[in-house]
Structure formats: structure tokens, C-alpha cells
Amino acid sequence: MGAELIRMTAAELGSAIASGQVSAVQAAQAYLDRIEQVEPGVNAFLHVDAETTLAQARAVDERRAAGEELGPLAGVPVAHKDVFTTTDMPTTAASRILEGYRPPYDATVTARLREAGLVVLGKTNMDEFAMGSSTENSAFGPTRNPWDTSRVPGGSSGGSSAAVAAFEAPLATGTDTGGSIRQPAAVCGLVGAKPTYGGSSRYGLIAFASSLDTPGPFARNVLDAALLQEAFSGHDPRDSTSIDAPVPPVAEAARRADVAGLRVGVVKELSGEGYQAGVLTRFQESVELLESMGAKVVEVSCPSFDTALAAYYLIAPSECSSNLARFDAMRYGLRTGDDGTRSAEEVMALTRAEGFGPEVKRRIILGTYALSSGYYDAYYGSAQQVRTLIKRDFEAAFEGVDVLVSPTAPTTAFPLGERTDDPMAMYLADLCTIPTNLAGNAALSVPCGLAPEDGLPVGLQVMAPAMADDRAYRVGAALEAALRDRDGGDLLSGSPYAV
């Protein structure tokens, strides 16, 4: 029974629970057993509390027995990236400075999924404060890619991507600041989405870069991702950047799965030198497949995309240096050196030196420098001007096409430790995803095969205008169905961790 439940899609499991074929408790127990079985080899979770999880599942069964009308994912387990606040579990952002911290409130994403009846399995590992592309920056050890445990699962949401890829959870949440959902989804063979900025609430999300952070879903197929995104999206008055507009019909688009007549633009700047040959091969095959299904494919040039990486690594660290100033040893979290002989400033310096990891310190220093009075205009101000140019490139492109496509990441999953001493090489993992974050548009990564040279997953990225998330889901679902028909099954069935 346990293996059968774990093999189900989230939509199928939700239907089985709703019909009474299986209980929410049985589903939760199946996944808890799976976590206990495989977690030592993956390290996807930072916190799992079986008692709390089963209590949530029993509550869902009781609500249904009482006749309460619940959503399509009621009773389905979900894992949360450890950057979303949860009242019943610690929230650490994978940092020593918040080790053991229990928030007094739930994030909006957490609360909405609870209301929809989803059952929280636990909190997943991540790059500290979401700063990284490999989940090697966690203070609690790296997560491993279920396709090859000697390789990274992507980042910063690598714990969530690994948990879903290892069948430890059917669904997971993540955050995408520069590609931190789409890139790990790509290298783990999953579907991952970055909703339109403001389409999902940041309330209760431990901030990295406030103008970029976007909560989004991980799933093993496009429809499941759409259902999860719909469950937590929508206007939130507690988030000043939240968009007061209807949630795009992403689940309907995922079920439609049709690209006939759709205009698809292939971004010229997001390919070529520096891209792994197998990634480009699978991407080109997928574009040809979309064309064979009736899409109209054209090449599109977005010249400002070439400067996106540089702009991002000025804007994001600048915002992080401001946001992380709150971790000062005075209000909550770690406190070091307070022996009565030191000043508040000394305690603060000692605490931040001990509590923050190397990558977080690197970005705080870089951001503080970029915001300093002598360099603000030259660095931060110039980066914001580039951001405007990137947004204009998107606007111009979307006048001629409905969606844009590119590889999600330039390479497949790289070996653990390969880039830890080379920040620039690490940052290049987000080369294709960053432009969408800077513009605030929607984007989706969908698996498009395995690279022939290493047998590891490749992702195709679909980018859509703001609040047109449904277009990305429509294309992603159509490609997913075509690849399944062509290959006789889904990608994850070939994974070493397949159930």
C-alpha cells in the first residue's frame, strides 16, 4: 500500500483521499516511512516531526468526515522549504544564527496550504538564507541529488527538489530569487515554477532580496505544480507587493496542454558557448517537438539579458545586506560573547561572525559596498538601470510571441564541491533564470529528457508575461504529454530512487 500511494501523483492521491479509498493518515504514514528509509542518503530535510504530521492528517480526515468541503489536495503531504515560518516546527533558513527558532506565526503560504488541507511533512534543507545554487551553503550539511548522490540537487531550494525527486514528498514549496526553484527542478528532473512577482505572498518568508523573492511550487508533473500554486496564491493585504487580481487559471491551462497556434520565441542570448552539449541537444529536440504540435517557433533577441547576471549580483546582495541587518543578537536567534564585559556592538559582531556562513558574509559585504555613499550610483544605481532594460526587452519580445523558451540551466547537476571555491562558476548556474526575476515575470521549468553524456536530467524553461502564468503551464503540460508519449513514461521512472 505504501509504495502504491507514493507512486500516485498529488492529484490522484487527493482524489483517492476524497473518495475514501485511502485516508490522509495512511498517505502521511507512507511518506514518513519513505523519509525514514531514504533520508540518510539524501539529507533533504532539516526537521521532520511524525507526531505533528499525523495529527494534521487526522484533523483532515475528521474535517472530511464532518462533511466539510475541502480542496483537491486535501490530505496530500507537502514539504516546506525552511524559509517559510511555521508555528509548529522550527524555521532556521539553514543558518546557525536561527538554529532552533520557532516563529510565533505562519507564513501566508503555510497558512493557506493548511486551510486547503495539505499535511506538512517537515522543513527542507536549503542554501543558508537562500543564497546559493547547490544547497552546499547550508549550515547543516549539503543535500544530495537523488539521480546521483555525488552531485548537487541545485539550490537554493535543493532540499525541496531532492525530497520530491526521491519520492519523500509528492509536493514541496520553494522560493525563487534568481532561479532557486527552476534550477533545482531542472537538475532533479522535476517541474518547478516561479509565479509572477506579487502573485504569491511573501508574508512570513524570511527575506533575502525583497524585490525578487517569489514563493513557488515543486512537483513531479505540471498539473500537480499548478494545483499547488493555485492553493497558496492570491492577494494578501499583509504583503505590500501582493497583486490584487485573480489568480491565473494555471490548473485549467495544465489540463488543456495544447500549443496549437501559440507563438514561441527561442531566446538567442540563452544558448551557445558555455552550455553543455547534451543540454542544448535536449532543448532543441523539445523545441522541434513543440513545433510539430502546432506552435509557431521564432528566434528572439533580448540583448540586455547578457548583463542580467552582473545586475543581479549587485541588486540581490544590496537587498540582502539590508534585510539581514535584523540578525543583530539583540532580538532573537544566536547570541555570542555576552559575558558582561563586551559592548552591544562587540556582541553583535561576534554573533554575526559565528552565525553567518561564508557565502552570506560574502554577499553582505558586497551589498554593503554597493550601497555605500561613494559607490551607490556607480554600482547599485547602474544595476537598476540594467534591470529596466531587461524588462523592456521582455516587453518587446512579448509583442511578437506568447512565450519565450530557453534551457533552464546551462549544465546538468555538477559534482558536490566542484564550485564551492569558485563563486563565479557557481553564479553561472542561474544564467538563464535571473532575467525573469529581474523583470518580475512568470516562468516554469519542465523536464525535457536526459543529457546523453551523463544521463542526468535537463530542464526547459518557459517564460511568460506577468500574470500570464497559465501560458507557461499550457506549454509545459503539452511538452510533458508529448515526451511521455514519445518515451513511454515519465522521466523520474528512470531515477535510482524511483519507487
Image (cartoon, helix red, strand yellow):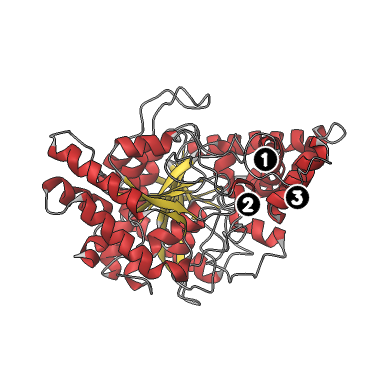
For label 1, the residue is: 320
78 vs 356, nearest the viewer: 356
Exactly how many numbered labels are in the figure? Answer: 3
For label 3, the residue is: 353
Secondary structure under the numbered disc 1 in the rendered image:
helix
Q: What residue type is labelled 1?
A: Cys
Tell me what residue is drawn at x 65 percent, y 43 percent: 304
For label 2, the residue is: 96
Quadrant location, the C terminus: bottom left
Res. 366 visible in picture: no
Q: Tell me if 102 is positioned left or right of 428 in this view.
A: left
Res. 404 visible in picture: yes
Query: Could you tell which of marks 3 and 1 lies nearer the N-terminus?
Result: 1
The residue most toward the right is 374
295 vs 127, nearest the viewer: 127
Query: Could you tell which of marks 2 and 3 lies nearer the N-terminus?
Result: 2
- The quarter holding residue 415 reads bottom right
Where in the figure is residue 442, as x and y percent of width and height?
46, 40
Query: Could you tell which of marks 2 and 1 lies nearer the N-terminus?
Result: 2
Asked if labels 3 and 2 touch by Cβ distance under 8 angstroms, the answer is no
Q: Single out the mark in the foreground, 3 or 1.
A: 3
User: Residue 371, relative to residue 473: is it above or below?
Assistant: above
Asked if labels 1 and 2 touch by Cβ distance under 8 angstroms, the answer is no
